[in-house]
Amino acid sequence: MTDWAEVADGVWHARYHPIDISTVLVRGDDGLLLVDTRCNPREAAELRADVDALKLGPIRWVVNTHAHYDHSFGNQEFGGTATIYGHRRIPAHFRDFEQPRLDVWTADPAAQPQYDWADVVLTPPHELLGESRELDLGGRAARLIPLPPGHTDTDLVVHIPDADCWIVGDIVEESGPPMFGSGSFPFTWPQVIRDLAAEVGGTDVVIPGHGKAVDRRFMLRQAAELGAVADAITAAHAERLGVAAATTRIAADSGLPEEIVEPAVRRGFAQLGGATP
């Protein structure tokens, strides 16, 4: 069983491998809210068993912080027993990014043997949110806040006001560099973090999508790093650099690995109106 740490009053955080994915439990008088469901139904079943062993109550609500596979591909394990909430854009993201990626992965299971893709059935949230929603967990509230495009256009954070706790998904990452994965928006992402940080108190607990709990200062540092990458992409595009040359330069200047920078450059160039090879 993975260790769960109570990081705020009635809020438990666990870090599951592979890829150090954050999962979070919030306890109310009427049951548990679970945030994110891991990579596949086998991992989700392990997650459910671990939660059951804690004897904190039943999982009645599930929230996806965004559409990426490591946060949502376990949804099918909970779809029949809990109400799943997520950003209104998740079905479109599933269609455009996750389903094609899943098709490639299932065609060659040996390529990623650490995952069980064959049994995954993409299961979008039951409740698709385009504006903030407050859930009554029994004796406490959970605020579900859809965000503008940043890490993806499906980002949603969970705020537990009485615990001064924010569960932010991959808008912020601690145990590795920010990932410009499928559907990222490198130019707006920094401001999304800054706007969210403006609502976060100086002593509030912030749980990122990967890694240990952080704070508002960490958020602002990451926003600055992402802003520098965005500015560098804009400059490279103006100079008509190709993707490869821009990636090499930005990686060297930022200290980020080229495999992290390259998709950011491709996404950024596309959003700026195309790129040279």
Image (cartoon, rainbow, N blue to C red):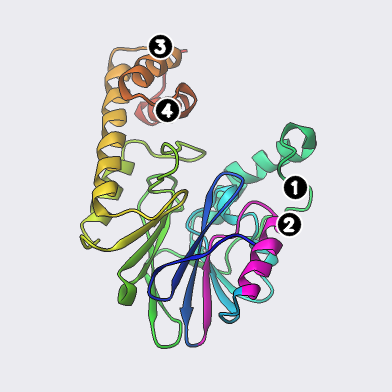
Instruction: Tell me residue 69's x, y (percent).
Output: 60, 48
Amino acid type assigned to the residue bearing label 2 in the image: Arg
Query: Does 37 lie within the magenta span?
Result: yes
Which badge, 4 or 3, comes first in the chain's sequence?
3
Tell me the residue at 39%/39% (across/down): 185
Query: Going from the N terminus, do you reach mark 1 or mark 3 first?
Result: 1
Q: Nearer the viewer, residue 127 or 162?
A: 162
Which residue does the numbered mark 2 point to in the structure image?
42
Marks 1 and 4, the one that precedes in the sequence: 1
How far across and down, in percent of the image, does residue 108 sit?
Answer: 78, 34
Q: Residues within 10 Å of mark 4 (few under 14, many from 20)?
A: few
Q: Which residue is mark 1?
A: 116
How many angstroms separate mark 3 from mark 2 (CA)? 41 Å
Label 3 SS: helix
Q: Earlier in the sequence, mark 3 or mark 2?
A: 2
Alpha carbon of mark 4 to alpha carbon of mark 3: how far? 16 Å
Question: Mark 2 vs mark 1: which is more N-terminal?
Answer: 2
Q: Quadrant of residue 100?
A: top right
Which residues are the magenta region? 30-53
Name the residue that disc number 3 marks. 245
Q: What residue sits right under mark 4 in the picture? A: 270
Kindly check if marks 2 and 1 are in contact, taking CB atoms under 8 A apart as contact.
Answer: yes
As displayed, is residue 88 above or below residue 230? below
Q: Are marks 4 and 3 in contact (CB under 8 Å)?
A: no
